[in-house]
Amino acid sequence: MSVKHHVYLVPGFFGFTNLGELLYFGHAYEFLKQDLARRGIDAEVVTVVSHPTASIRQRTADLLKAVSETASGDDGPIHLVGHSTGGLDARLFVSPGAQVSEALELEPFARRVRTVVTVSAPHAGTPLATFFLGLFGQQLLKLLSLFTMYVLRFGRLPLSVVFRFGHLMARADDQLGWKATLLDQLFDQLLGDFSSERRDAVTKFLWDVGRDTSLIPQLTPEGIDLFNGGTHDRPGVRYGSVVTQARPPSLRTRLAAGLDPYAQLTHTIYAFVYGQTQRMPLTQLPLHTPAQTAALVQAYGAMPGPTACDGIVPTRSQVYGRVLAAVRADHLDAIGHFDQPAHQPPHVDWLISGSGFRRPQFEAMWKTIGDFLMEEEPPR
């Protein structure tokens, strides 16, 4: 009788697996499920519902709840694949002695974990979180989240919204000229295009975001330093990471984004968040092992510089355990949110970075993840 494997996809910051057709892991879920089936692996793939911006401890409790509800019927191996902050949730889940929930015991499930894969995760933090601590940053973050959901639902933002947001971005460094009413108007216009039922769900999601933002300070380089000091690897668990690096905003990336006004103005969003993410303090950059360094050099042709990032997380902050893949992609490309509308179902992009990432690279990356999950390991 074959052993049943349990694979959990853990969303990152602003994960919205609970918004009906707005699927965070949609393409990754389908590909990984089919890939494991082709290998003849009996595997259940589960997407985890997490509080969007709650603390890492609360999000890890959400992961524990999902595991307890779906993996209690047997003693099969457990595999955790976390995108962005979801990678930190996965690390805390397996950390020996971790206490995340008073209602559920973690250790019986943690000892069954065989692999932890992190994708574009901020293991050394990201300076973008520092920016989002401010009032302007928090409002902007909620709006960017709504943009993401809108684009995944309708394919693109209305041009009227894009132009007004582009004007806001152009004045972001001069906040004296910013008026809160503009953000309110953008919220109202975008929410008005959803159905009544979906609008209620999106509104609740955004309310949850505003109610608990304890995750944001934890993702700063200083906050993650504390997290790393109290979170330890579990002996016997294999750790792997997928690393992403996007092109810096330039004339080349603007041309790669296309001449469509929507593409050009949404590229401005990417340029703005990229600029914030570049500000990683040199003292916070982690040291890498020779094997990790060699993997990055082989993939990129040279060691990524201190300002290299995927638009959201510094590239060198993403390295943890074995480097499974290091790809030219932005932060959302890695989970299938890139521009390839001809594919069925279509891939939809909103963070238009001009990275050039497409379906072949996506499949190769997730196949590598599948290889690592099912890699032969000595019996315990």
Image: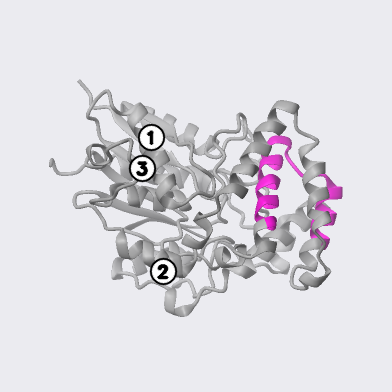
Labels 1 and 3 touching (C-beta < 8 A): no
Of 3 and 254, which appears nearest the observer? 3
Question: Can the viewer see residue 260 in this picture?
Answer: no
Q: Quadrant of residue 318?
A: bottom left
Q: Residue at x 19, y 44 (%)?
A: 377
369 magenta-colored: no
Q: Are marks 3 and 2 in contact (CB under 8 Å)?
A: no
Question: Which residue is labeled 1 in the image?
Answer: 65
Left or right of 364 on screen, residue 351? right
| Mark with earlier residue (3, 2) | 3
Q: Nearer the viewer, mark 2 or mark 1?
A: 1
Specify whether 282 is left or right of 169.
left
Which residues fall within the magenta stretch?
139-167
Whether residue 12 is visible here, answered yes or no, is yes
Tag 2's secondary structure? Answer: helix
- Identify the amino acid type marked 3: Leu
Residue 260 at x, y = what percent? Answer: 81, 52
Q: Is residue 150 above or below residue 88?
A: above
Is 165 one of the magenta-colored residues? yes
Q: Residue at x 39, y 62 (%)?
A: 319
What residue is disc 3 on?
Answer: 80
Q: Nearer the viewer, mark 3 or mark 2?
A: 3
Q: Amino acid at mark 1?
A: Lys
Indicate how the structure is coloured in the image: one colour
